[in-house]
Image: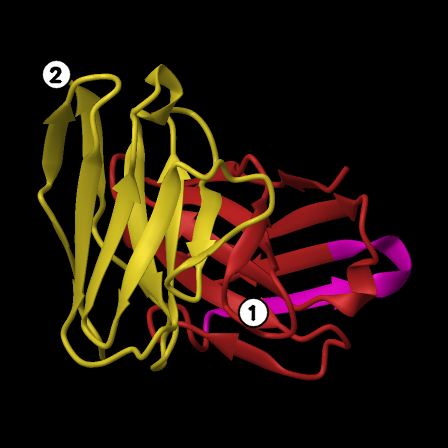
Amino acid sequence: EIVMTQSPATLSVSPGERATLSCRASQSVSSNLAWYQQKPGQAPRLLIYSASTRATGIPARFSGSGSGTEFTLTISSLQSEDFAIYYCQQYNNWPPRFGQGTKLEIK
Amino acid sequence: EVQLVESGGVVVQPGGSLRLSCAASGFTFDDYTMHWVRQAPGKGLEWVSLISWDGVSTYYADSVKGRFTISRDNSKNSLYLQMNSLRTEDTALYYCAKDLVGASYYFDYWGQGTLVTVSS
């Protein structure tokens, strides 16, 4: 089974700055990767799928890149509402798996 | 507006059974594969099960295979999860989630979850 590893576990960034979150797969998942945002007490929200396609209604400041085993979620200019936990998720190999999450906190 | 509303979560003893429900609205329910995803308290996300649009195909995580059964009633726009032989490690918030398209395994809408606590 594929293991998804996210780094860092916690990222401290100031509002208005850029945030770069990483996700690594233990073997290639091609471009079959998604990113989700989860705020406290809320359900996850799909941000990016197929590694780089923004989901409906997601602001352009969110972008995804990568393929194979290395993926990045970039938030170009952090807004107050972006501080949350972010999960990557692969579906290229059974079963679908999530990473352990990166907590994005205000610096 | 797409809405998914889960119900049925309670406190249950180890070895017990429970049935979760998810009421869907705002989209053509029988066009979409549906999933259950769970999250243990303070932990990450774990995919649990899926059912195809027509209910013919079902799949399960190894951790629940043989104990949980997913089903749907398209006439009622509802998704279900029958949970048997519950273990303490099944304690989690259970979300139903809609597949983005086909069986992409991308989850574009989620409910707010229903909490299952397995404890003696």
Q: Which residues are magenta?
A: B67-78
Q: Quadrant of residue B51?
A: bottom right
- Residue at the (59%, 78%) spot, across then down: B58
Return the residue nearer the eye: A62 or B34. Answer: A62
Colour seen for chain B: red
Q: Which mark is residue B50?
A: 1
Q: Which mark is residue B35?
A: none
- B72 drawn magenta: yes
Colour of chain A in the rendered structure image: yellow
Q: Chain of mark 1?
A: B
* Subunit that carries the residue with mark 2: A
- Which residue is labeled 2 in the image? A107
x and y percentages locating residue B8 in the rendered image: 61, 41
Q: Can the viewer see residue B16 in this picture?
A: no
Task: Name which residue type carries label 2.
Answer: Lys
Question: Quick check: B92 left or right of A29?
Answer: right
Q: Are marks 2 and 1 in contact (CB under 8 Å)?
A: no
Kind of residue at badge 1: Leu
Left or right for A84, reference B56: left
